[in-house]
Amino acid sequence: MISHGKNIKLFAGNSNPTLASAIADSLKVSLCDAVVGKFSDGEVFVNIQETVRGSDVFIVQSTNNPVNDNLMELLIMIDAFKRASAGRITAVIPYFGYARQDRKAKARDPISAKLVADIITKAGADRVLTMDLHCAQIQGFFDIPVDHLLGVPILTPYYAEKFKDGLEDVVVVSPDFGSVTRARNVARRLDVPIAIIDKRRPKPNVAEVMNIIGDIKDKRVILVDDMIDTAGTITHGAEALIDRGAKEVYACCTHPVLSGPAIERLRECPIKELVVLDTIPLAPEKQIDKIKTLSVAPVFAEAITRIYEEVSISTLFM
């Protein structure tokens, strides 16, 4: 039952306008009119061009690079809608930045993911809709409801079709212990075995492969991760798999951060194809032949519809 009786109002910041438009198309609505820009001194301004009083407002804004600019846009948009008397404000954050700063790894470290969650809540968001948080426990950092979508249900049908000739020699591989649950989910859906790369990380963004747990010899393997940043983990893992007898290496992730040397590493590594989702837009220089992009728009559109209609969306998490 829809208690508010208002139409969906879908707005977008500047982080990923292509995805926002695709979500609008899937919803069969138009993006609402708002101008989000900067003053000459760099401060963000927001100008809402239509009434939102009592409306169910959804703001599509990933907090990818430039992270702080996109985060400030999101916060100021939330504040603007709150002051314009929106009925409910949902922050749709396909990629949640700062998620890797989720604990104190050493003395005097900040827990920035908790800080960002608090700021979004304080700005006036009533709920958050996101996908593949780096750690699912980050949901607990928010004092408002969080709907946490998964990228696996989008990725696995692609591989089921790609390897429809037979999955007998396919193995899903987790690049580290942190991604085992995600890899196991993919393996279960495809009904194939799983293997794990045991590695040590001597310092940030530097990974050293130690051992591979599982049988990958003469197999086609699929490396599964939530995000690829500098691509060190995924490319070193691919090289180790080939060195240990894998026949072909494929890879996939939800969030293609692809910073620093990532593209060069991907060009030179033995990965045949990298499948990513469009939670983060790929700049033209990152759109190499080896990368294939799948859209999350239909899943987010379905989640937005269910939130608006106030019905369960838990089946979208599975």
Image (tube, rainbow, N blue to C red):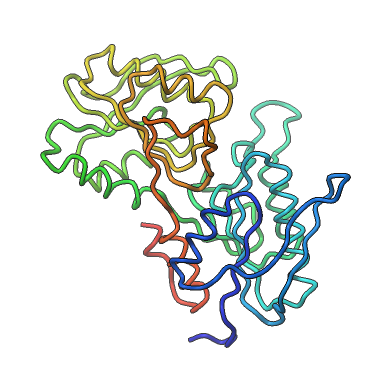
Residue 308: % across, % down: 52, 76
Q: Is residue 258 left or right of residue 98?
A: left
Outermost residue on the top side: it is 243
Residue 6 screen position, x and y as percent: 59, 84
The C terminus: image quadrant = bottom left
- Vertical placement of 266 versus 79: above or below? above
User: In the drawing, does residue 87 fall left or right of residue 200?
Assistant: right
Q: Is residue 181 visible?
A: no
Q: Nearer the viewer, residue 63 or 177?
A: 63
Please name the residue shown 38% across and 18% down the image.
269
In the displayed structure, would residue 202 be above or below residue 278?
Answer: above
Residue 177 versus residue 129: which sits nearer the camera? 129
Q: Quadrant of residue 121?
A: bottom right
Image spot of residue 78 (x, y percent): 72, 63
Q: Residue at x 64, y 39 (%)?
A: 65
Hey, which quadrant is residue 192 in on the image?
A: top left
* Residue 54 visible: yes
Which residue lies at the image location 77% right of the left edge and 58% below the top edge? 76
Considering only vertical position in the picture, is 42 above or below 196? Answer: below
Q: Is residue 302 left or right of residue 89?
A: left
Which of the pair 140/218 is nearer the observer?
218
Task: Give the quadrant of residue 193.
Answer: top left
- Residue 153, given in percent of the width and then of the height, sits at 34, 52
Q: Is 163 placed left or right of 261 in the picture?
A: left
* Number of callouts: 0
Which residue shows up at 52% across the image and 31% down it? 285
